[in-house]
Image (cartoon, helix red, strand yellow):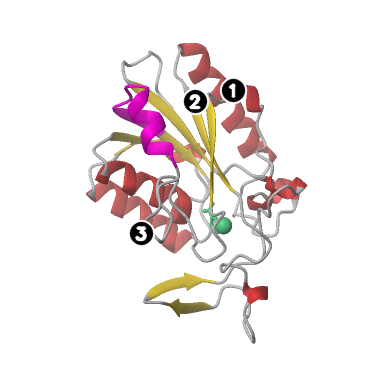
Amino acid sequence: MQINTKQDHTAVVVVDIQADFTQAMQGSLAVGDADREYLNAAETQTRRLKALGYPIYATQDWHPANHISFFSNHDNAKPYDVIEIEGRQQVLWPPHCVQDTANARILMDESLFTAIVKKGMDPAFDSYSGFFDDGKKETGLADILKNAGIKKLIIYGLATDYCVKATVMDAIMLGFDVTLIKDLCRGVTPESTAAALEEMKAAGVDIC
Ligand code: VGL
Ligand code: ZN
């Protein structure tokens, strides 16, 4: 990572670095290689960016127990099945990031964050993006950033091919300049991670 100076109107968004997405915590939806070394690197770099003067925001997947994305809430479903719900593709995940459970916690010193934006609280809609859920309801992140005068975002976290990609693509759609720090991201599968990086690059994201 080669960000050594503070740029104006720029904030950091740390996506879903939560226990359930990490091998380090034996999470229910552990992302490949999200191990202790990864967590240490993410925390160290976040502290460095904070010390440079960047405001740091975090997103947090925060589902009710009856969430539509949990395979266990559907009859005859297995983890990672893909079904259609009202025209939307929905991956059925192992239950994860259930509100107020230890496995939903962010594995970073929360005092680093200017704000934490929770997402995925509506039982009927998934929300990979930190900006909008699948019903297009805003999480509040866009307003928070707009009110703070932010125009550029530095984004990293979990998972590259799901929540990071969705957050990055919505950020681009909303008009932010986006830098993705690839080394501080981990994906669910190598194929979908490579495809996500291509998609983000094609959208004009600076990948470093
Ligand atoms: C995520 C799957 C389900 C993520 C969240 O943070 O990438 N992936 N919920
Ligand atoms: Zn989720």
Q: Position of residue 100 (x, y in %)?
A: 73, 47
* Magenta run includes residue 183: no
Q: Is residue 176 left or right of residue 92?
A: left
Which amino acid lies under the numbered mark 3 shown in the image of this protein? Ala
Q: Position of residue 31 (x, y in %)?
A: 60, 54
The residue at 63%/22% (across/down) is 111
| Circle 1 SS class | helix
Q: Which mark is residue 112?
A: 1
Q: Is residue 92 left or right of residue 168?
A: right
Q: Position of residue 200 (x, y in %)?
A: 31, 49
Which amino acid lies under the numbered mark 1 shown in the image of this protein? Leu
Dot in front, 3 or 1 = 1
The residue at 51%/51% (across/down) is 159
Dot in front, 3 or 2 = 2
| Circle 2 SS class | strand
Dot placed on the residue nearer the N-terminal end, 3 or 2: 2
Q: Which residue is mark 2?
A: 56
Quadrant hosting residue 16: top right
- In 3D space, how far apart are the residues under numbered discs 3 and 2 (Cα atoms)? 27 Å
Q: Position of residue 45 (x, y in %)?
A: 54, 25
| Circle 3 SS class | helix
- In 3D space, how far apart are the residues under numbered discs 2 and 1 (Cα atoms)? 7 Å
Q: Which residue is mark 3?
A: 195
